[in-house]
Amino acid sequence: MTISNSVDKSKKEGTLMILLVASNRDIASLSISRQILKNYPFQQSVEEFRGNSVHKANINGRLVELVTLNDESVQAQDIADCFPKVELIIFVSRHSSVKGTPTLSAHTPGNFGEAELGGIAKRVSIAPANAMRKVLILMHQFRNEMKLAYEVSYECTHHGPSLDIPAMFAELGSSIEQWKDEKAAEVVARATMRCVSTISFSPVPAVLGIGGPHYNAKFTRLALESNLAFGHIIPKHALHMVDVETIRQCVERTMEEVEFAVLDWKGIKGEDKPRIVQMLKLADLPFKKV
């Protein structure tokens, strides 16, 4: 599989090299990685990455490596240069919010505006829409099985790094109490590893989400209850930074073919609606309102 700035849309089933990335500066990340190493057949390699152990496993014929950063994951702009054969990166990470609502979430990284928290300005990563949907569904399933009082949600595209290969975050939040919650960390670990072991290029349709809040309940519900996989999600608060080139970039930098945009119509300001519709027409991208 070849993935570059112009994404190859004709993927075939085959052997993948998948990289799982944790961070020593992230309590939740370390909680999740401990659960992965505890419950899955990883072996410590003779290799090291920046002074930290590298663990490897063969998961259903796929080579999976788990590495740990000394910096925050959002600053891992050079990670793909260090692993040139990697075809999918999953960052296991903490999620933070002021409200502190217990949350399990998934999103792809990238910036619609300035690079205030890692990455490259106005540059989004390649979104693995079906992998994110798979993790979201599995988080929801395992949360229910373990009877945990956590919300499960997509987040919008935000923060670094801005990578030229498919990348996503699987997160545990939203405060230190949850970051140390081993049962919740197990949910994220299980969802991540089940996704890794069952990832497929026979995808459900990929779509671009536009509008609504940072945590979009409508888009989450659509992914959980119907055959739609969201790649990039542009929230209401970022629409002032978006132009037609941003729309095109979000389409081109999605692992799968983006079939249409889904508009959270009530979650778009009245003054932005005509501009968004016009941009979608210029980008030749059909859209549906929810």
Image (cartoon, rainbow, N blue to C red):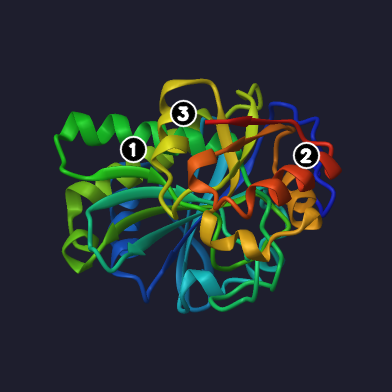
The residue beneath circle 1 is 139
Please tell me which residue lies in front, 244 or 1.
244
Q: Mark 3 vs mark 1: which is more N-terminal?
A: 1
Residue 129: x %, y % from top left? 59, 38
229, above or below 91, in the image: above
Q: CA distance from mark 2 to mark 1?
A: 27 Å
The image's mark for residue 1 is 2
Seen at 44% across and 52% down, the residue is 213
Q: Quadrant of residue 5?
A: bottom right
The answer to the question of whether label 2 and label 3 lie on touching residues, with beta carbons closer than 8 A, is no
Q: Earlier in the sequence, mark 2 or mark 3?
A: 2
Q: Which residue is mark 3?
A: 222
Q: Nearer the viewer, mark 2 or mark 3?
A: 3
- Nearer to us of marks 2 and 1 is 1
For marks 3 and 1, give the CA distance.
15 Å
Q: Earlier in the sequence, mark 2 or mark 1?
A: 2
Bin the neighbour count of mark 1 within 10 Å (Cα to Cα): few under 14, some 14-19, many 20 and up.
many
Say which element carries label 3: helix
State how far apart marks 2 and 3 are (Cα): 29 Å
Q: Measuring 60% from the left and 23% from the top, which residue is drawn there?
A: 204
Specify the farthest residue to the front: 271
